[in-house]
Image (spheres, rainbow, N blue to C red):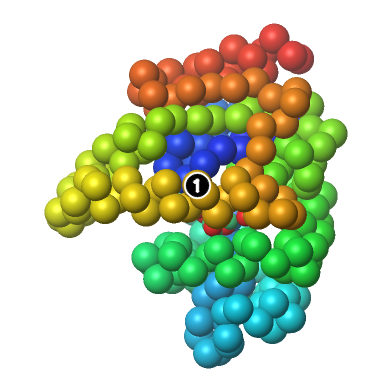
Amino acid sequence: MIITIDGPAGSGKSTAARNLAKQLQFAFLDTGATYRATTLRALREGVDLTDEAAMADCAARLELRMQRRGDDVAVFDDGEDISLAIRTEEVSANARYAAKPPAVREVLVALQRDMGQQLGDFVTEGRDQGTVVFPNAEVKFFVTASGEERARRRVEQLAEQGEIADFETVLANILDRDESDYSRAVGPLKQPEDAIVINTDPNTPQQTIEQMLAHIQGSR
Ligand code: C5P
């Protein structure tokens, strides 16, 4: 069984996907990690991020492996644990250079399908999972939340890590990421026609999982 979860940055889809996979004892595929790992390689190698052929070459040379570690999934490239290195602000801010070029997406979509084939039952999370990568998935979710709520959560998360962030700046970054996610020509963020839409604005993370489980049980 394949369950896809798509949605904008900060909507809560990542937390939901991880918890859902755990509760169902399904594997978990984090497709954002493939774009992040491509970006990390490019930054480390000093590649011109606007050179689409060079970015596609970085993607083609990835040797990715994802492995469950406690409640999380560790990401390795060519044997190196890059789980933390792909989550820096620098990688987040530059990931659009991996996400936009069709040549990069072609390589990474093929990689994601290959990884999925080895997983058995799995939950996959991203922007184009229900529309492009796994259009035949049995259950598709599209997770949304308002920009303000996503910014509020991010500010709170940063505060827990001891970082004080300005709400307006965080909100502007989120809206900027939305713009590049929704507007790219290939693999844009888009609600699959057959998706169940969940607005997480009023939800606790547990309520989102419960809504998802109710839909999954109904479709089994
Ligand atoms: O979800 P996450 O923040 O880890 O995604 C990292 C980057 O990869 C984002 O810029 C997002 O637009 C892109 N992405 C994508 N397609 C996916 C998953 C992520 O373009 N399926």
- In the displayed structure image, the side of residue 164 where residue 25 appears, left or right: right
- Residue 69, given in percent of the width and then of the height, sits at 49, 53
- Residue 46, given in percent of the width and then of the height, sits at 53, 90
Residue 103's image quarter?
A: bottom right
Q: Which residue is mark 1?
A: 178
Disc 1 crowd, CA 10 A, few/some/many (<14, 14-19, 20+): some
Q: Is residue 34 visible?
A: no
- In the displayed structure image, the side of residue 122 where residue 181 appears, left or right: left
Three-letter code, disc 1: Asp
- Residue 212, given in percent of the width and then of the height, sits at 57, 20
**Placement of the C terminus among the 4 image quadrants:** top right
Residue occupying image coordinates x 60% and y 30%: 142
Residue 120's image quarter?
A: top right
Ligand 1 shows up in the quarter that is bottom right
Residue occupying image coordinates x 78% and y 45%: 132
- Please say if 37 is above or below 134: below
